[in-house]
Image (cartoon, coloured by chain):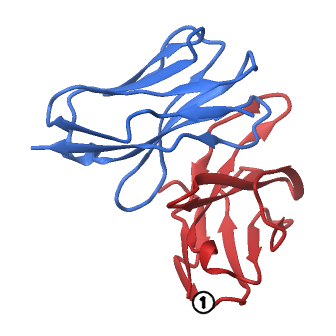
Chain colours: A red, B blue
Amino acid sequence: DSGVTQTPKHLITATGQRVTLRCSPRSGDLSVYWYQQSLDQGLQFLIQYYNGEERAKGNILERFSAQQFPDLHSELNLSSLELGDSALYFCASSVVSVAVGAYEQYFGPGTRLTVT
Amino acid sequence: AQTVTQSQPEMSVQEAETVTLSCTYDTSENNYYLFWYKQPPSRQMILVIRQEAYKQQNATENRFSVNFQKAAKSFSLKISDSQLGDTAMYFCAFMKPSGDALNFGKGTSLLVTP
């Protein structure tokens, strides 16, 4: 158990709909990352938040958005869903500081999204 | 952008034997971090080992060790005394010291047979 939790574990929805994925980081970790794992694209970085603020952006579609709340949990919102959005979505957390530098990222169990 | 290449899509090894998984990367950075993650059939991403580029000594974690060749931009993973539970997809990943994205390779599927 990495200490990172994600809900829900599975999500089945129809095209055009909107869903919200939730992530709680490990205790003490200020940084949260979202990744998408699909068969054709592999593991891709979507977005990073650090202590409530967006820090880095990857290949995240405009239909997708995220935020990190004061209690450090994060949500990934996916809207106008398409069949191609079906994937495993991972959240990871890490201790990151300017003084100490970067540390390894610990992954949650993932949310499997199926768009029908 | 940093790219990570895993040239072996699939590998197989017998229980108790040793296997080496290859990884090369491309970067202009001088300092960075490299990781191996394991993804078993449960799909959980599990950190196996970490290497800082400024450290010359190769990292070791129990049966897992790396061969880090900075000049060659190579970062291979050696699994000794392979166990059935090592069956998984293994991903090599690169991260800049700023601590943003992990850049993953496409993975190597390892099967450990009895």
Residue A57 locus on image (x, y percent): 82, 52
Q: Is residue A86 above or below residue B53?
A: below
Residue A25 locus on image (x, y percent): 67, 59
Label 1 element class: strand
Q: Quadrant of residue B32?
A: top right
- Is B45 on the left-hand or right-hand side of A92? left
Instruction: Kindly identify the residue that appears in the image at 27 percent across and 47 percent down.
Output: B87
Of residues A8 and B110, the one nearer the viewer is B110
Residue A75 locus on image (x, y percent): 75, 71
Query: How many labels sit on residues?
Result: 1
Instruction: Name the subunit of mark 1.
Output: A
- Is A10 on the left-hand or right-hand side of A50? left
The residue sitting at the left extreme is B114
Alpha-carbon neighbours of circle 1 within 10 Å: few (<14), some, or many (≥20)? some
- Is B53 on the left-hand or right-hand side of A16? left
Instruction: Kindly identify the residue that appears in the image at 24 percent across and 45 percent down.
Output: B111
Q: Is residue B42 above or below residue B55?
A: below
Residue B38 locus on image (x, y percent): 42, 45
Q: Quadrant of the N terminus of chain B?
A: top right
Q: Quadrant of the C terminus of chain B?
A: top left
Of residues A109 and A82, the one nearer the viewer is A82
Of residues B74 and A56, the one nearer the viewer is B74
Instruction: Kindly identify the residue that appears in the image at 75 percent across and 20 percent down.
Output: B29
Q: Is residue B13 above or below residue A13?
A: above
Q: Which residue is mark 1?
A: A13
Q: Quadrant of residue B105?
A: top right
- Label 1 sits on what residue type? Thr
Q: Quadrant of residue A105?
A: top right
Instruction: Kindly identify the residue that appears in the image at 66 percent across and 89 percent down.
Output: A15
